[in-house]
Image (tube, rainbow, N blue to C red):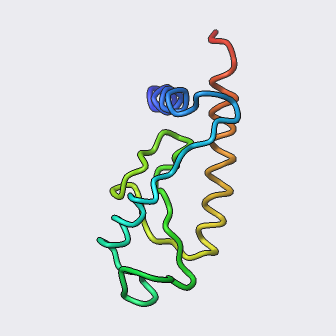
Amino acid sequence: MTLRLSILTLVLLACSGAGARIERSQAEVRAFRAQEACPATGRTRGACPGWQVDHSVPLCAGGPDHRSNMAWLTVEDHRFKTLVDLRECRKLRAMAARPAR
């Protein structure tokens, strides 16, 4: 139950409104890519075919937009994870909007 409240608190802090757009730092993505080479090409610059940078803890759930919260995922895995992350964040926002009992 404590974990649930902690996550709920993070969501409340991360979201300034129902449709709040979360800003992403391209500088942090570049820093991550400079640290972690593309799994497909082994390069730190240029295209990375079939792979995308993902936030391990979603931004909508209060995860930091920092290279320590980033990882490479295949395009297919990233699509699926994003779908799940968005669904969970919607649930958390709905829970946060309900009055406490």
* Total marks in image: 0
Closest to the observer, 92 or 41:
41
- The answer to whether residue 19 is above or below residue 81 is above
Q: In this view, does 64 lie above or below 40?
A: above
Image-based side of 32 in relation to 9, left or right: left
The residue at 64%/36% (across/down) is 20
How far from the left and from the top, in percent, is residue 84? 65, 54
Residue shown at 58%/28% (left/top)? 16
Residue at x-position 69% and y-position 47%: 87
Residue 79 appears at what percent x and percent y? 65, 66
Front-most of residues 62 and 46 = 46
Position of the C terminus, as image quadrant, is: top right
Residue 52 at x, y percent in the picture: 53, 72
Q: Residue at x 53, y 41 (%)?
A: 61
Give the residue furthest to the top: 101
Question: Residue 11 appears at what percent x and percent y?
Answer: 54, 32
Q: Residue furthest left?
A: 35
Could you say which is closer to the camera, residue 100 or residue 42? Answer: 42
Q: Residue lying farthest bottom? A: 41
- Vertical placement of residue 20 versus 47, above or below: above
Residue 22 horizontal side relative to residue 46, left or right: right
